[in-house]
Amino acid sequence: MLESFNFLVILEYLPLFGQGMIATAWISAVSTFGALLVGIVSCMMRLSPVAPLRILAGAYIEFIRSTPLLAQLYFFYFGLPTLGIRLNEYQTGILALSLNSGAYIAEIIRAGVQSIPWGLIEAAMASGLGYFQRIRYIVLPQAIGVTIPPLLGQTIVLVKDSALLSLISVMELTRAGQLMNSERFMPAEGFFTTALCYLVLYHLLKAFSTWWQKRLIFRPA
Amino acid sequence: MFVYYLNNLIRTFPFFLKGLWMTIEVSALSLMIGTVIGFGVGIARNARIPVLNHVLGVYIDFMRGTPFLVQVFIVFFIFPEWGIQLDAFSASILSLSVYAGAYISEIVSGGLDIIPGGQIEAASASGLNWFQRMVHVVMPQAMRPILPPLVGQYVLLIKDSSIVSVIGLTDVTRVGWLTVQRIPEGLMVFGLVGILYFVICYPLIHLSNAFEKRLRLQEFKLG
Amino acid sequence: MKKWACAWMAILMVTAVGVSKASADALQEIVKRGELRVAVQTQGPPFSFVDKAGVRTGSSVEFCKLMAQEMGVKVVFLDFDWDGLIPALLSGKADLLAADMTANLKRALKVRFTQPFYYTGSVIFTKAADTRSSLEDFNKESVTVAVLLGATGEAVAKKYLPKAKIKSYKGGGPLLINAVLDGHADIGLNDESAVMGQMAEFPPNSIRILPTKLSKEPLAFAVRPEDSHLAEWINLFFEWVKEDGRYDENIRYWVKSLDWKKDH
């Protein structure tokens, strides 16, 4: 098998894979940011005392969690134009990724917030802090510390999920492999190189996560 | 126009049900095989056999570090170059099972790790060998931390099964993709696809939560 | 070290078996097996598509049914996205590739084409309301051209519209029409026969085809390079159906008109 493995063609396509990797990286970064926004907002809605907000956020989260990302992606890609909303594929992809990861992030933050001992909140209330001040100074900082590792985990998931964008013609890493298959009929060279690139991204992110967790542990109390 | 499309969609509904059945079939088969693989690998990893541990580690790393979509392409396009000819259905089951196996094995070895070391020592002190320890002492207890996340993982895998639609397997996602090219009402078509998935996954998610609550209560009872 | 060697030996042996299997006479294999496996497009009217009743049909599909009849075997259709057709043929999943595929030189390096069964050409299509009609109008950086991944449209677009942005879609022709109607692309570029057959699926008068044919495309079926007996048989088949009128009937019904729309 190795005799026929054409390294020369891989070298020829290397710039394409580089392009793809950069695209995957920035799409994932923007989507993660979007997902954080969506996640924080929907988490606050979920925990709010206002019933309609709570139900709306709850419905959104349950629906996202019970349906596949691919179906959601196609929903936006084929559905938005019928509403007259014309986004390009990058925007559609980032929208779908943000909304999808946002729901999971909302749950992660909710778990983090609910892990805060009630006594701490009582103390904050007794000290005269208002609702938003409590959130800003007590709840969020604690919640963030607990939630960073699962959040980084969700980021890794998002990078892998971004591969689906290749199916709506976004030029990213998986698309580079597909092009090598359809232009040169060399699936092995194409998809193994793609897999390798993803593994590199995965290990980079995992290393960052481990470093961050060590930082958390060694932080002076 | 909208009513015209809606009529078309209603007429295509049986096709969606066929796709849903395919999704269920593929998911169920892959989950069963994946669970067997997962338990096998998880227990093997827990046993910490030197070379095997490493090899299994590489397998799990590959499964978790690459997108499932790429894995599906590899099985479907590259395996034939090695002489392994697979149709879309078999390729889907193979890739989904292997993928599931990796994640399930992590849940299993995580659950096994929770068992206090003292239990294992007591069991071997009582004269039980490795196999008897596993079957009578470790596994029954490990089921508690394993079951809830396992059901949760099943839901994730049913959703991931939508990805095999790209190699032409006519599951409910592909039915949607094919239909939307003839009935260009994306919201309706994929709204329907979403509802069909929801009907399967939502109950399972709540089953998993219910499991977790029940098993945690049991833990408290046992003190 | 030894374990590695054994693993590689196993892989090489499996590959060798796979390769040697392919060099047996494919046509006789098909007859012996009693089954002809054809790789077709999932959704590429009028050549291969699934009709309202959920039945696979189309010009290429019907030709293959006739072929199977003449061979005395049954026919099985395996459908793929456009870019998956040749890999399916080469990997042995299918014996024959039946689609409106252009027999260009690059593909001919990998597969063996039969004699062309039809000649078409690439055309540009736009939204009906779009009034632009010359190549200069479209050869600009601000213009996006939708083409099919792995199709000749990609090369034609690069040749005639070098400045425009080219977007490749994985799947089939209808996706390109969808893209233009949704605004994801300004224009689409595909074979005239494909566009004509596929625009019937969309609201009438939403798409306008520009009259200039940008290229001449000989459409042919394909088999694996070593299957010369099968290729010759298929060529002979087309000779016979051209003589007895069945070819003309097929092409008239499916490709030259929209008569098929009434029944399917």
Image (tube, grey):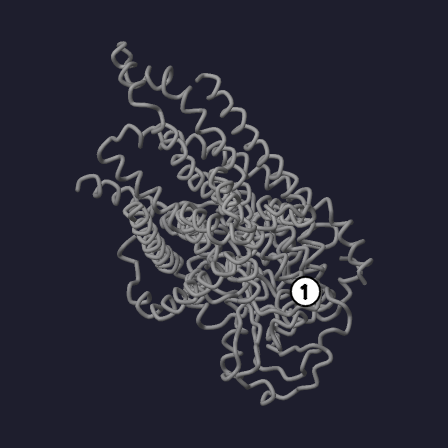
Q: Which of C113 and C257 is in front in this view?
A: C257
Q: Quadrant for residue C261, please give it.
A: bottom right
Residue C224 in the image: above or below residue B36 = below
Quadrant containing the N terminus of chain C is top left
Residue C225 in the image: above or below residue A114 = below
As drawn, which residue projects farthest toward the left? C1
As drawn, which residue projects farthest toward the front? A127
Quadrant containing the C terminus of chain C is bottom right
Residue C18 visible in the shown view: yes
Q: Position of residue A149 (x, y in %)?
A: 39, 47
Instruction: Name the residue rendered at 54%, 63% in the picture.
Output: C170
Q: Quadrant for residue B52, please give it.
A: top left
Residue B207 in the image: above or below residue A14 = above
Q: Nearer the viewer, residue B28 or A68?
A: A68
Residue C89 in the image: above or below residue B117 = below
Q: Is residue B86 left or right of residue C250?
A: left
Total marks in image:
1
Instruction: Name the residue rendered at 77%, 74% in the picture.
Output: C205
Which secondary structure lies at badge 1? helix
Q: Nearer the viewer, residue A160 or C55?
A: A160
Residue B168 visible in the shown view: no
Q: Pointer 1: what residue? A: C247
Q: Position of residue A35 (x, y in %)?
A: 51, 57
Q: Position of residue C189 (x, y in %)?
A: 59, 75
Q: Where is residue C21 in the image (x, y as percent from the top left)?
A: 39, 47
Q: What residue type is labelled 1?
A: Tyr
Q: In this view, does B143 lie to the left or right of B134?
A: right
Q: Residues within 10 Å of mark 1 (few under 14, many from 20)?
A: some
Q: Mark 1 falls within which chain?
A: C
Q: Nearer the viewer, residue B135 or B203?
A: B203
